[in-house]
Image: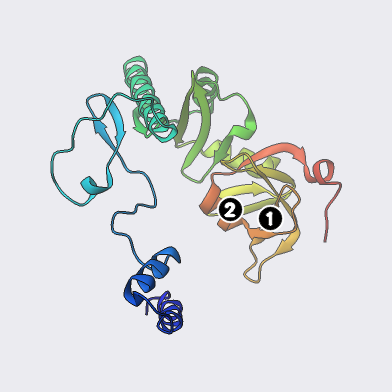
Amino acid sequence: MNKNLPAAIAMVRELLAGGGDVASTIGHALDGAGLLVDPERTFGTVLRRTPQGWAPVAPATQHVEAEPAEPELTQSTELEQQATDWDAACERARQLADSARTTYRSEPDFVGVRTDGDTVVVSLQITELSRWAGWMATLGIVEHQLVTALDYVVCGRTTIGDVPVSVLAYGVPELQLVAQATARRPYRHAGLIYDLAVGHKDLTGDTWYFHGDYSAEGMPLLSKDGRPERCTLAAVVDMLGPILPVREPIAAAQGGERG
């Protein structure tokens, strides 16, 4: 049932007791109360590509297949500018991917490169740890906390110019052993070893900490920047991952563990 119906019925019942043009009064009252649907109304701006760039779609053209008129030359709106900036970022990523393909295709470790929106994704097949160290130096992945090790792939994040780059290195089992050996409080989830003794930064830049609590299923519960709300490690990884360890231990960042 339309959730507006009870309110509409109550308003109609009240207005029927009045005089004059009751139908018009009721119609305007319902519309003013937001209880009528306006077919011309849009709850968001829709953009389309034109030879001149991005332009908003007029409400009438969203429901018909007629050829839209050329947009007038006006100053870009914030949304149009965001769309243009996104196009430019994606184009920079495509150019970087093409350059990386040309530069690294002769390397024995290089598998391929692709774009994912404004991000470049480089795939490598590594058989020696020294080769991965060389790639880290070449691509600017120099901090240990920017690397996570799965059973089958090592993931690194870096930036070349202003283009985000994700590096996937397959076949580096030594790093998994290093992660296990250096973790003070290791916990394995989906093949990845997490050190619960340190915080983990998500893709948005927030840091999550473990304070000793587990869910009923035995999954570690994390809190963001010391806030009381808790979220399972699995949920944080699924929604905001990959999450990367930070060097500062919980004791220094949060003043010790809390039970």
**Which mark is on residue 258?**
none
Q: What amino acid type is highlighted by mark number 2?
A: Val
CA separation in Å, label 2 and label 1:
8 Å
152 left or right, relative to 149: left
Q: Which of marks 2 and 1 is nearer the N terminus?
A: 1
What amino acid is labelled 1 in the image? Leu
- Determine the residue located farthest toward the front in the rendered image: 20
Q: Nearer the viewer, residue 175 or 44?
A: 44
In the displayed structure, would residue 120 be above or below residue 254? above
Where's the C terminus, which quadrant? Answer: bottom right
- In the rendered image, the residue lying farthest to the top is 103
Report the residue at 74% width, 53% height from top: 227
State the image coordinates of residue 33 (x, y, percent, origin top left): 45, 66
SS class, disc 1: strand
Q: Residue furthest left?
A: 66
x and y, in percent, of residue 40 in the image: 29, 54
Q: Is residue 17 above or below residue 111?
A: below
Name the residue carrying label 2: 236
